[in-house]
Image (cartoon, grey):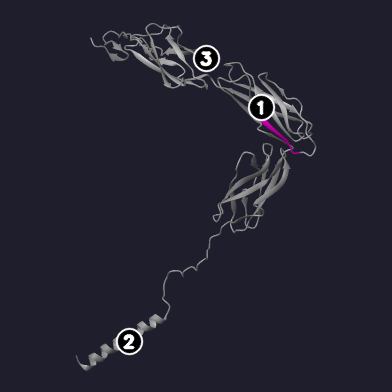
Amino acid sequence: MNKITVNLVLGFSIASIGTALRAADQPAATNAAAPVEAGATNSAAPKIVFATPVYDFGKVKSGDPVKYTYAFTNTGDATLTLSDVHPSCGCTTAGDWTRQVEPGKTGAIPVQFNSAAYGGSVFKTITVTSNDKSQPTVTLQLKGTIWKPVDVNPMFAMINVPPDYPPNNSATVHIVSNEEQPLTLSAPESNNKAFTAEVKTNQPGKDFQLVIMATLAPDSGNAQGQISVKTSSTNVPVINLTAWANVQPLVTLIPQQVMLPSGPTTEGQTAAVTIQNNSTNALLLSDPSVDAKDVKVDIKETQAPGKAYTATLTFPAGFEIAQGTKTELSIKTSSQRTPVIKIPVLQMPHPQSPVITPITPVPAPPGKTPTLSGKPVTQ
């Protein structure tokens, strides 16, 4: 390589290095937009802000409605839309609330709470759903104290009557006066003779017990009655409550009837019935029988002493219950209240045969083949 060539190569290399250094000192050219600074946004969004998300209504008398209107503002820069306002229970209802609110404007959600069934401290919530992505749901609160002039607990008296019940079964209702003036109660009245009631005083003028008794005949079924007590209170002049007596049967049968397939049966059939004793006393069963020919019954105690049994019925081949005939299983018991247990025996009806309509050949004109329903007849 001659001297001239060396100088040219050396000069080109030095120039290339200089160009690279100058390019590194300059900002890079690009067609892409500059990166967006952290936290910056160009999209508009609504924002819901409530003036008072928690409303304490203080103390109100039971039965008085509680009304309040929750006010809110859209502090965002896009239209705020409320899609739902949902109270936590049926005692609280929302009125005609504002559906859409422009930026900087305000809206309202009127609510009403029915205090009739409440006493003491209460706490209710209302869930508001909107298009505010930062808080799609907001929970509003409604709280306070419900004052009752007279507390009655419970308002529904349930009396469970066992099978071997004594003559009278009772339930107790507690009555407490919250008024300053002493309370007096009159003699209770009942609209059902199966129920009687009396008032017992725990603290004169303040605290009472209402004892409700049910007197029912054996196997009379359930009973319901209305008990009324007049008071000296101007706020609660009459106390009305419901009494219900639930009479348990002596035995529970599973199933309550024996169902057989349609007859006559081609082979022997068996069926089983479970007999559960609901009494606290042992129940003895004897002399099982079915008022039909050649039906055998076997009883086995499955829970001692005398608490549960299984009755197994065996029906002969060809067994069939004649139409219009009543057939039942009878079992004697040691109970004077229910001396005999009777269980119906039923049989499925015969399946109906399909009705076949005969096809009549259609006469054909001379020179043509006769047909059946439009098809040629084979000669």
Of the pair 237 and 175, the residue shown nearer to us? 175
Q: Residue sitting at 33 percent across and 84 percent down?
A: 17
Which residue is under mark 1? 242
In the visual, does 54 lie left or right of 307? right
Marks 3 and 1 sit apart, C-alpha to C-alpha, by 32 Å
Q: Give the prevailing secondary structure in the magenta stretch.
A: strand
Kind of residue at disc 3: Ser
Q: Residues within 10 Å of mark 3 (few under 14, many from 20)?
A: some
Q: Which mark is residue 335?
A: 3
Relative to 72, residue 252 above or below: above
**Of label 3 and label 1, which has the lower sequence position?**
1
The boundaries of the magenta stretch are: 172-178
Q: x and y percent of residue 58 in the render?
A: 71, 47
Q: Residues within 10 Å of mark 1 (few under 14, many from 20)?
A: some
Residue 7 visible in this rendered orientation of the protein: yes
Quadrant for residue 295, please give it.
top left
Q: Secondary structure at mark 2?
A: helix
Quadrant for residue 20, please give it.
bottom left
Marks 2 and 1 sit apart, C-alpha to C-alpha, by 107 Å
Q: Residues within 10 Å of mark 2 (few under 14, many from 20)?
A: few
Of labels 3 and 1, the one closer to you: 3
Q: Which mark is residue 15?
A: 2
Quadrant for residue 336, please give it.
top right
